[in-house]
């Protein structure tokens, strides 16, 4: 299992999903900076040093430790055709024992939004989590008004479960989030989407 954690590569139709590397710094910084206005309404406030090399180096080291311990699966989305960084997806808070679950988070650069990349990545990570990591439940949350995120979750097999009050600080304010989950053995059928 240790080698599986350290050498994670998930291949999809158009992408390779792999852990971040120190050599990704310039591409990551350029994509995040260029997509800042697109991303910041949906994310926790960026630290002042968010786009610095030091912060990115810490992110890479965190990813290596998380993979080594099995607590998270942080992956960059790399388009195979031209080796371009598109965004990132992380299966975090992986819990074992009776829970066997994790929490999914993701972002995509503005130039690559609404082209099906994130759906492709989500479906690949969910498949990996259920078949190779033996997880039973994957959770995700987003702001109620984030129609794009809700849509990609629903198209990827996630089902609406409710609203979490003051779930995360987004852009400096505690915000309610709608909760979704994907179950390995899901007998729930289709569920009505909440309006949160």
Image (tube, grey):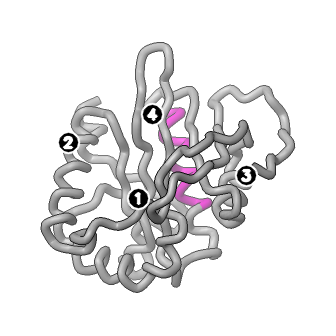
Between discs 1 and 3, the one toward the N terminus: 1
Residue under label 4: 132
Q: Residues within 10 Å of mark 3 (few under 14, many from 20)?
A: some
Between discs 1 and 2, the one toward the N terminus: 1
Between discs 2 and 3, the one toward the N terminus: 2
Residue 145 within the segment the image draws in magenta: no
| 10 over 136 or under it: above or below | below
Q: What label sits on residue 17 in the rendered view?
A: 1
Between discs 4 and 1, the one toward the N terminus: 1
Task: State the residue in front, 187 or 177.
Answer: 177
Residue under label 3: 154
Q: What label sits on residue 65 in the rendered view?
A: 2
User: Depth-wise, is mark 3 or mark 4 nearer the camera?
Assistant: 3
Q: Outermost residue toward the front?
A: 173
Choose top left, top right, bottom left or bottom right for residue 126: top right
Whole-percent x and y of residue 11? 45, 57
User: Depth-wise, is mark 1 or mark 2 nearer the camera?
Assistant: 2
Q: Residue at x 84, y 34 (%)?
A: 189
Considering the numbered disc 1 on the image, is that residue within a helix, a strand or a loop? strand
| 171 over 192 or under it: above or below | below
Span shown in magenta? 119-132
């Amino acid at each position: 299992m240790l080698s599986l954690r350290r050498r994670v590569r998930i291949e999809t139709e158009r992408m390779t999903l792999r852990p971040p590397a120190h050599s990704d710094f310039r591409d990551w910084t350029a994509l995040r900076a260029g997509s800042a206005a697109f991303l910041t309404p949906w994310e926790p406030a960026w630290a002042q040093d968010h786009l610095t090399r030091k912060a990115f180096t810490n992110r890479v080291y965190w990813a290596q430790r998380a993979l080594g311990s099995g607590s998270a699966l942080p992956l960059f989305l790399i388009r195979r055709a031209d080796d371009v960084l598109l965004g990132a997806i992380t299966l975090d808070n992986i819990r074992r024992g009776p829970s066997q679950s994790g929490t999914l988070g993701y972002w995509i650069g503005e130039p690559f939004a609404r082209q099906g990349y994130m759906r492709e990545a989500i479906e690949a990570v969910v498949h990996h989590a259920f078949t190779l990591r033996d997880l039973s439940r994957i959770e995700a949350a987003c702001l109620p008004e984030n129609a794009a995120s809700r849509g990609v979750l629903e198209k990827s097999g996630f089902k609406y479960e409710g609203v979490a009050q003051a779930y995360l600080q987004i852009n400096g304010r505690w915000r309610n989030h709608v909760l979704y989950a994907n179950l390995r053995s899901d007998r729930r059928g289709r569920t009505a989407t909440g309006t949160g």
